[in-house]
Amino acid sequence: MNFCSWKDRKAAAADLRPIYEAPTAEEAARQLDAFEDKWGGKYPSIAPA
């Protein structure tokens, strides 16, 4: 979160929550892909490559 701007931190943190609360590893991977799609363009350092 250190690389994310202050105005986007709350939204990015909210989008991280489903990854950590996923009931299965497969669901967590899907949520991680969705997070990367949304935030990877704007903040490539916070989304996996």
Image (tube, rainbow, N blue to C red):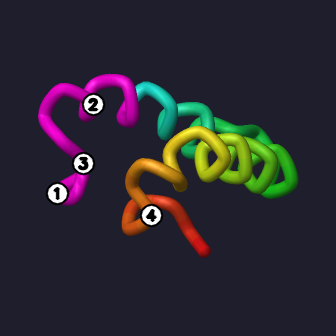
What separation in Å lies between label 2 and label 1 (alpha carbons)? Answer: 11 Å
What separation in Å lies between label 2 and label 4 (alpha carbons)? Answer: 14 Å
Which image quadrant is residue 11 in?
top left
Q: Earlier in the sequence, mark 4 or mark 1?
A: 1
Q: In this image, 43 relative to 21: left or right?
A: left
What separation in Å lies between label 3 and label 4 (alpha carbons)? Answer: 10 Å
Which residue is at a point 39% across and 35% down the rendered structure image? 12
Q: Nearer the viewer, residue 21 or 11?
A: 11
Magenta-colored stretch includes residue 4: yes
Q: Earlier in the sequence, mark 2 or mark 4?
A: 2
Check if mark 1's residue and mark 3's residue have beta carbons within 8 Å.
Answer: yes
Query: Which element is circle 4 on?
Result: loop
What residue is disc 2 on?
8
What residue is disc 3 on?
4
Check if mark 3's residue and mark 2's residue have beta carbons within 8 Å.
Answer: yes
The residue stretch that appears in magenta: 1-13
What residue is disc 4 on?
44
Q: Earlier in the sequence, mark 2 or mark 1?
A: 1
Q: Earlier in the sequence, mark 3 or mark 4?
A: 3
Asked if residue 10 is positioned above or below residue 43 in the image, the reply reads above
Which residue is at a point 76% across and 55% down the rendered structure image? 29
Q: In this image, 17 relative to 13: left or right?
A: right
Query: Which element is circle 3 on?
Result: loop
Query: Which element is circle 2 on?
Result: helix
What residue is disc 1 on?
2
Which residue is at a point 60% across and 33% down the rendered structure image? 18
Q: Amino acid type of disc 4?
A: Pro
Residue 26, percent from left and from top = 86, 54
Q: Residues within 10 Å of mark 3 (few under 14, many from 20)?
A: some
Of circles 4 and 1, the one toward us is 4
Q: State the residue lying farthest toward the bottom.
A: 49
Q: Amino acid type of disc 1?
A: Asn
